[in-house]
Every structure is written in structure tokens, then in C-alpha cells.
Amino acid sequence: MRTPHRRPTPVLCVVVALLAGLAAPVGAAKRALFDNFHAEQAGNADWVIDNDQPTPLPAQGAIVLSTPRTTWTGAISSWGVDLVKRGFTVTTNNAAFTYGNAANPLDLANFDVLIVPEPNTLFSASECTAILAFVHDGGGLIAVGDHHVSDRNNDGFDSPMIWNALDPTRLLGVHWGTAGDANNNIVQTSTNVNPAASDSVTHGPEGVAPGLAFHNGTTFTLFPADNPSVRGEVWMTGVAQSSTASVMAASSRHGSGRVFFLGDSSPIDDGSANPGNSNIFDGWAEIADSVLILNATRWASRREPTLGVADHGAAMLSLAQPRPNPSHAAALFAFSLPAAGSARLEVLDVGGRRVWSRSQVSASGPHEWTWDGRDRAGRDAGAGLFLVRLVTAWGTRTTRLARVR
């Protein structure tokens, strides 16, 4: 179901709270939470693993390797059943996201990976904070969208707009193609896959992903200056893999967590769906789309280990309190990197707008950068409370700065 595009009021989701480190331990059984609280069944969509929610039936304990992958009722039942066959437990979310709420059995802290299959309603500000904090602390996120003007419930927001609203400052390093962007509604089967054998998304436990088939999907623009870990997984046919545009699938890290982005919901459709749903087909089996998606899910659910220089990086990364604080004019920001790499320091106002930033490749060890108190246009930023954020491949650190007259 396709409806005319209506431009929304921008929604900013800014994480300003201290992150509580609530993610599950490395050794726990893998637990996947499939969202169905954000209109994933609107219009002709049926992006659920089963009608029985939050726990699908027949029971997961009865699923064996020979169980049909569409044994549950829902257009993405194959995704859920295939994960159970690989040792996961799967659950459907039917409430607002929380993180750190012990009274909520569906709290994100109880899961390893959050799968959001084409949301059609905006995340609230508290949900944005919960999602980004969950990922930062080691949780995985699978973000699935659809093409521009795919607003299935006629509320003025389609999934690319919703995903961009979650992360307006591109902490995750990705912009979803929407109004005014090229290739925001493509039909294409591409075998232009990241060839790196070390890439567990394209070369993972499910095997080597042969390609990806889109039937009206959007593409991504990558912003490595905003998140140095972001990388393309599948590009449009004929596009150089050095390109940061025309990306059909991508991945990145945020803090200790991992994110996979998929620009079309067609590949997750297994053709089963609930009775009455139209325009369904088995994208899960088309060009073996399932290989890429299952690899990505398993990759995203693996929390970063704590061995070696690269993996100790999150613990060794630091950002000190600004000096002076409060500040009348210039402020000094001191930080330390665990190894040589790209670092971005930015100042955000209370509305989440980027006032100032500086990015460069820096050596390991301590650094001191100075902000003169002016915005990117050279104007005095004025008095108020500001968020100072350090963004690196090893994670993100934040602190606060007060400016007074």
C-alpha cells in the first residue's frame, strides 16, 4: 500500500543520560526480540514471526532441523524458525522499548539482538534513548526499512524517515535514502557484495552471501567521518565498493554493539503471511537472501570480546571533563585513544543540533583540542548547557559543558 509523501516535523533523539552497562553477559544463550509495536503489520505488511505473541507457538523446544521454516504464522516466520534452529530463543515485542526497567520482561537488557522489521510509527524520545544505549552497551540491532513513500499506515512517516529520526546526528554512520536522495526506490538484484573474508556479515557461519534482491527498496549513504566503523556490505550493481553512496546493506558499530542496515523488506518476506495479505513472495529464498540476513543477525548478536588492543579499546577510550567548566569563552577537551585512528569531537546543544565538530586521524594516547566557543558559522554559541561527544571506532564518550556569560 503506497500513499503520497508528507514531510514530517524533524524528531531528534539525543542520548544525554549515563549508559548503565545493562547488556547481557557474553556467555548467555542468544535471545532475539522481534518488534511488533511500531505498526509492522500495517497495510499489506505482515512482519511478524507468529500471531502468538510474545511467545510463538508451537513451542520453540519442539522445533528441530526438519521443521518447516514457515511452521509459525507470519511473513517473517522463516527468520524466527531459522534462528531457533541455530540455538536462539525468539520473542515478539508488543510494548514501548525500555532499557533498564526490571519490571518489564521485554526490556532490551533481557535480549542480545533487537530486530525491527520496517517500523511504520516513530520511536518516542525515550525509545530512541533506550535503543541507542542498548546498542552502545553491547546489544545488536537489525534495522530493516523500505523504499521512500512506503507509509503503510498513512501517518506521514515511512521507515526511512523513522530510522533517520532515530539517529539524526548519524552516530551509527548511515543516512537512509528518502525525499531528494538518489536511488530511494530501486528494483535490483545485485551481486556486488563485500568480498572480504574477514567480514562476518558477507562471509559468516551461514556461508558466503551471493547477493541481495530488492523489490522497491531504498539505499544508504555512509558517513565514516561520523562513525569510522561503518562499511558497505552490498552495493548496487556497477557501483565501486569505495563509494559511500548507493549502498543496499551496511553495518557499523556503536560502543560495544553492532548494527546491520537493510534498505528493503522484500528479502525478509518468506511468502507465508497471514491469510488476506497480498503481494507476498518468498524473498527469503530468492538469491539466498537468508544467508546475508542470518549472517548479519548472528554477527550483531555477538558482543565485542575484551581481549587484545582493539577489543580493549572501549575500556581504554576516555574523555575528561572540559576545562574550565563552566566556561566563559574557550574550553579545552582532553581525551585519550587506545590506538591510532579516526576521532571526531563534537559539541551539541540541548536540542541535539551539532554546534561544532573536529575530525582527524590521531595517534594513540592523550590529546587536547580547544573549542573557541563559536559555532560552525563563526558565531558565539551563547550561554547554556552543551553535550560534548567523542566518537571513535572503539565507542563513544560523552560529557557536559556549561557556558556562562
Image (spheres, rainbow, N blue to C red):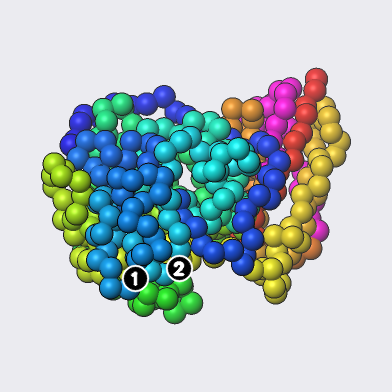
Most foreground residue, 205 or 81: 81
Residue matched to label 2: 87
Question: Which residue of the protein is positioned furthest toward the top in this rendering?
Answer: 405
Residue 306 place in picture, x, y as percent: 69, 68
List x then y, in percent, for residue 149: 25, 36
- x and y percent of residue 97 in the render? 51, 38
Q: Is residue 395 visible?
A: yes
Could you tell me the amino acid type at mark 2? Gly
In this picture, residue 365 sits left or right of residue 300: right
Quarter of the image holding residue 78?
bottom left
| Figure check: 61 above or below 187 | below
Label 2 to label 1: alpha-carbon separation: 10 Å
Q: Magenta segment range?
A: 366-390
- The mark total stands at 2
Q: Quadrant of the C terminus?
A: top right
Q: Which mark is residue 64?
A: 1
Q: Residue at x 38, y 69 (%)?
A: 85
Q: What secondary structure is found at the residue carrying circle 2?
A: loop
Q: Secondary structure at mark 1?
A: loop
- Who comes first in sequence, dot 2 or dot 1? 1
Q: Residues within 10 Å of mark 1 (few under 14, many from 20)?
A: few
